[in-house]
Image: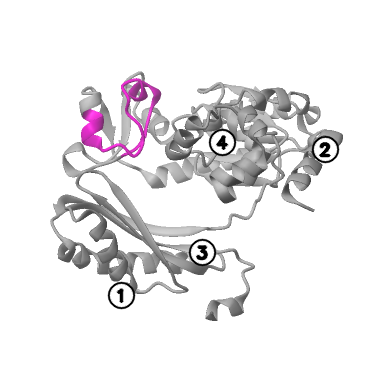
Amino acid sequence: MDQKQSIKDEAKTAKANNATQRKIIHVDMDCFFAAVEVRENPQLKGKPVAVGGAANSRGVVAACNYEARKFGVHSAMPMSRAVKACPQLNITNIHMDLYKAVSKEIHSIFQQYTDLIEPLSLDEAYLDVSDASYCNGSATLMAEEIRQKIFDSQRLTASAGIAPNKFLAKVASDWNKPNGQKVITPDEVLDFVKELPVTAISGVGKVTAKKMDSLGITTCDDLNKLGLDKLQTHFGSFAESLYRYSQGIDNRPVQNHWIRKSLSVEDTFQTDLPNLEACLLELPDLYQELLRRLKRAREKQKLIPKALVVKLRFDDFETTTIQMSGTQPNKHAYMRLCADAWQRGKRPVRLIGIGLQFNPPDFPEQLRLL
């Protein structure tokens, strides 16, 4: 059976089974880190807040609230640039232990409704409530109750999306932010995705969106009309997922066992590293930290590396990533990768990151020897 026929069959099956009767809730906390900081310091309420490092020490915005976003501040922005955009910005340090503790309390609320919970991060998760009997089985009412319980216990707001699958639930949770929710019923799926912008699809970043725009693709309906064959010509292996999403199809189950796909460490330096030699001197410390994190991660699940990765960010903020196949971390291999990556820019470096990508847990053990 070819891919196109397979996807058509999936669409027919989903329609016949009323989208398999799944009820998925995606809960997404509103500006989580920043909201926790405002809760802890009420004097910050109503003011622009960014969580991260100091502006005068190469700090980066880890999170910010909506008041800061109005000025163009966003996560991953250099804090110095954020302060220029918003001079009245209130900067707080990152308190990760606090965020983890709050997240644990929030997840305990999720567990009152279902055991099928897939955390995506500290501040968002999928819940499969298909078989839950609470609220007479209404996922909409369950989402409302969950959001209210979060507010009552944590004084924090959350948004939610309710839909027959994960893709649509995640899109819906962003629809009425902050402190709102949206429902997409099975009968509404096709009409909803028809007008959905392609930028709402996970994996469609700036580069892909620009390419789509040049092809006249702005909505999911445009993707669907283009067809799988042409999508494969332009987008390769991503085409099949795009074609499914364009029809509102997503059969991924809610996974309550998280599978790690990668692991990395990185450092932003207060002073730019002037040359390759200076970069290589920083690698041993990064490598040791990577080994420590890998050891901790392996205590929780089986991890089979498939590639070593190095990321460099130059002083002009251009970023390059390079990788090579490898079954185990190797300091000398990272040094070779770093040297090759530096040749792409040949400029002072402000950030170095090294990491690993992993094979699926069921990857055949004997293939590691090839």
Residue 347 against residue 142 in the figure, above or below: below
Q: Residues within 10 Å of mark 4 (few under 14, many from 20)?
A: some
Q: CA distance from mark 2 to mark 3?
A: 35 Å
**Viewed as shown, does residue 86 lie left or right of 356?**
left
Q: CA distance from mark 2 to mark 4?
A: 22 Å
Q: Which residue is the site of mark 4? A: 201
Q: Which residue is the site of mark 3? A: 358
Q: Earlier in the sequence, mark 3 or mark 1?
A: 1
Residue drawn at x 71%, y 42% is 114
Amino acid at circle 1: His
Marks 3 & 1, CB-CB < 8 Å contact:
no
**Circle 2 — which element?**
helix
Amino acid at circle 4: Ile
Tag shown at residue 332? 1
Q: Nearer the viewer, mark 3 or mark 4?
A: 4
- Which quadrant of the structure image shows residue 198? top right
**Viewed as shown, does residue 117 lie left or right of 71?**
right
Q: Earlier in the sequence, mark 1 or mark 2?
A: 2
Q: Which residue is the site of mark 2? A: 12
**Circle 3 — which element?**
strand
Q: Where's residue 346, x and y in %?
A: 19, 56
Residue range corresponding to the magenta coloring: 61-83
**Viewed as shown, does residue 40 lie left or right of 258?**
left
